[in-house]
């Protein structure tokens, strides 16, 4: 792993880029276990210190399209 200097401040673009990359990684991990991952979007941004976003990991039902139904949803963090 390379050492990268942290940014002095966060930007909306950087937050979105990181969210996208982390969702991609969570999707890959979920798929290895037969699950699906769905981003729930940015929920809190403090451009000086941090940002928060959500990921929903679900058990896919046969023919299931609506990931927001919650019927077979297992919540977790990646």
Image (cartoon, helix red, strand yellow):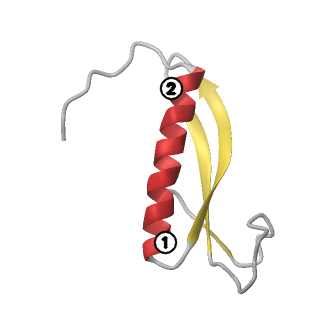
Q: Is residue 20 left or right of residue 56?
A: left
Label 1 packing within 10 angstroms: few (<14), some (14-19), many (20+): few
Residue at point 20%, 30% (across, down) = 3
Residue 55 or residue 62, whichever sits in front: 62
Furthest-top residue in view? 8
Toward which corner of the image does residue 63 lie, by quadrant? bottom right
Give x and y (percent) for residue 73: 68, 72
Q: Which residue is mark 1?
A: 31
Q: Is residue 55 left or right of residue 32?
A: right
Q: Secondary structure at mark 2?
A: helix
Q: Secondary structure at mark 1?
A: helix
Furthest-bottom residue in view? 62
Q: Is residue 57 left or right of residue 62?
A: left
Label 2 packing within 10 angstroms: few (<14), some (14-19), many (20+): few
Give x and y (percent) for residue 72: 71, 78
Give x and y (percent) for residue 37: 58, 63
Check the picture and name the quadrant holding the N terminus: top left
Q: Which residue is mark 2?
A: 14
Toward which corner of the image does residue 5 lie, by quadrant? top left
């Amino acid at each position: 792993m390379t050492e990268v200097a942290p940014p002095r401040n966060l930007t909306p673009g950087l937050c979105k880029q990181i969210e996208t990359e982390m969702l991609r990684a969570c999707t890959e991990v979920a798929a290895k276990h037969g699950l699906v991952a769905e981003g729930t979007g940015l929920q809190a941004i403090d451009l000086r210190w941090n940002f928060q976003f959500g990921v929903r990991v679900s058990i896919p039902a046969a023919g299931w399209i609506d990931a927001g139904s919650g019927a077979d949803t297992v919540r977790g963090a990646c």
